[in-house]
Amino acid sequence: MKIFLIGYMGCGKSSLGRRLAKRAGVRFVDTDTEIERREGASVGDIFRFEGEDHFRRMERSLIDSLAAEDGDMVISTGGGAPAWGDNMERMNASGMTVYLRRSPRQIASRLSLHGRQKRPKLRGLNDAELVAFMTANMAEREPFYSRARLCIDCAERSDDELIELILSKCRGDE
C-alpha cells in the first residue's frame, strides 16, 4: 500500500514518514527531497528561478510515477501538493492519504530559523507574520487536506501513537 502523508509545511510529514516507513519495513520518499535530487537545486531555488507552477508540475509527475510503482511505500508530499490540480483525487485513488493536522502556532513553534529560511513562502517573516500567513494559507488548503482518507489531529499524540494509529487504519483495524 502507498501511504501519502499530507499537511502543511512543517507539520512533521518527513520526520514521521521516515519513522513510519522504517516501522512498516517499506521505502520512504520525500517528494521535495527527490525533486531537489533530480533537479540539482533546492525547492527555494526552483520556486525563485523556475516558478511555483514549474515545481508543482514536477511534483505532480513524481506523485504519478510513485503511485504507479510496484511495492509499498510511505510518501511525504509537499504542503501545497494536495491543493494543486487533482492531486488529492489521484493520491486517494492510489493509496491511503493521511492528513497530519496541526495548528499554525504548533507548526510555528516546530520550525527552526533554518526551517523557515528553506521554505520560500516563509522566508523573512517574524513570529506574528508567520502565524498570520500560515493561518490564512492553511484555511485555503483545508478543503483539499480534509479530503484525506484519514485526518489526524496531531496535537496531543506522540509520534509513536501517530505511527500506530496510521498502521492500524491501513490494516483495517477498528
Image (spheres, rainbow, N blue to C red):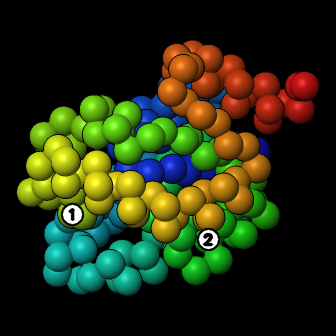
Compared to residue 88, the image places residue 8 above or below, namely above
Q: Position of residue 161 (x, y in %)?
A: 62, 17
Compared to residue 163, the image places residue 136 above or below, namely below
Q: Secondary structure at mark 1?
A: loop
Q: Quadrant of the N terminus?
A: top right
Compared to residue 127, the image places residue 87 above or below, namely below
Q: Left of 170 or right of it: where is 69?
A: left
Name which residue lies at 51% across and 36% down: 17
Q: Position of residue 127 (x, y in %)?
A: 17, 44
Q: Of callouts 1 and 2, which one flags the residue occurring earlier in the amino acid sequence?
A: 2
Q: Position of residue 109 (x, y in %)?
A: 27, 32
Compare residues 99 and 45 and report the one nearer the observer.
99
Q: Amino acid at mark 1?
A: Pro
Q: Quadrant of residue 80?
A: bottom left
Q: Left of 146 or right of it: where is 132?
A: left
Q: Is residue 53 visible?
A: yes
Separation of disc 1 and disc 2 at Cα? Answer: 21 Å
Q: Are marks 1 and 2 in contact (CB under 8 Å)?
A: no
Q: Left of 115 or right of it: where is 146?
A: right
Q: Which label belongs to residue 120?
A: 1
Mark 2, Cα crowd under 10 Å, few <14 / some 14-19 / many 20+, is: some
Q: Which residue is mark 2?
A: 87
Mark 1, Cα crowd under 10 Å, few <14 / some 14-19 / many 20+, is: some
Q: Is residue 66 visible?
A: no
Compare residues 146 and 64 and report the one nearer the observer.
146
Q: Quadrant of residue 41?
A: bottom left
Q: Secondary structure at mark 2?
A: helix
Q: Position of residue 145 (x, y in %)?
A: 60, 57
Name which residue lies at 17% across and 76% down: 48
Q: Amino acid at mark 2?
A: Asn
